[in-house]
Image (cartoon, rainbow, N blue to C red):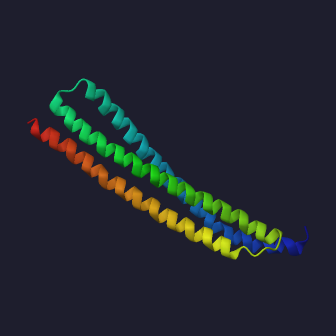
């Protein structure tokens, strides 16, 4: 590789920094989401264990809370999927940046499409994440109501 071709990679490296930082940030977001998914699963298992030994009146409450947890799990799953697709898109974008310099191919339309698609995917992921957070309060309200009746 000559010095002129190395010089062509410097702007590509500078351009690739943005998607690399995006991937890093989404990695932290995915960590948060998978932790929430784990807590949903743990809580569901605990409720299911208690369901077998519960009275009929508390079984209805447990089933209501399990329904909310199931919905939360679906939202978090969609959020994780969309965030992962954003990372995948950013990774492919970085690869295309380098390939376009190596073989002098104009991939600007594909790169722009990948970036826009990734941002849309990230936005939708965050919407599903917010839906999960809101449902957390619904599950808490069900539990709170069940304890208020037992006083």
Residue at the extreme right of the image, as rendered: 2
On the rendered image, what quadrant is the N terminus found in?
Answer: bottom right
User: 143 or 58, which is in the foreground?
Assistant: 58
Q: Is residue 116 above or below residue 59?
A: below
Left or right of 7 in this view: 137: left
Left/right of residue 33 with respect to residue 136 in the rendered view: right
The C terminus appears in which quarter of the rendering? top left
Q: Is residue 40 above or below residue 120?
A: above
**Is residue 147 rendered to the left or right of residue 140?**
left
Q: Residue at x 34, y 54 (%)?
A: 133
Residue 56 vertical position relative to residue 31 in the rendered view, above or below: above
Residue farthest toward the top in the current orientation of the protein: 53
For the point 30% across and 49% down, the residue is: 136
Q: Residue at x 24, y 23 (%)?
A: 53
Q: Quadrant of residue 109?
A: bottom right
- The spot of residue 96 in percent (x, y) is 72, 66
State the image quarter where residue 19 is shown. bottom right
Residue at x 91%, y 71% (from the top left corner): 2
Viewer-nearest residue: 144 or 45 = 45
Q: Is residue 136 left or right of residue 79?
A: left
Number of numbered tags placed on the structure image:
0
């Amino acid at each position: 590789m000559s010095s002129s071709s190395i010089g062509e990679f410097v702007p590509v490296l500078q351009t690739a920094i943005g998607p690399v930082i995006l991937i890093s940030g989404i990695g932290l977001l995915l960590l948060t989401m998978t932790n929430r998914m784990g807590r949903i699963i743990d809580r569901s298992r605990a409720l299911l264990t208690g369901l077998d030994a519960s009275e009929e009146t508390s079984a209805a409450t447990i089933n209501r809370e399990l329904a909310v947890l199931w919905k939360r799990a679906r939202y978090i799953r969609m959020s994780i999927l969309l965030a992962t697709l954003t990372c995948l898109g950013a990774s492919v974008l970085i690869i295309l940046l380098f390939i376009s310099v190596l073989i002098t191919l104009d991939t600007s339309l594909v790169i722009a499409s990948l970036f826009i698609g990734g941002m849309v995917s990230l936005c939708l992921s965050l919407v599903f994440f917010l839906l999960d957070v809101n449902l957390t309060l619904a599950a808490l309200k069900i539990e709170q109501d069940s304890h208020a009746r037992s006083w």
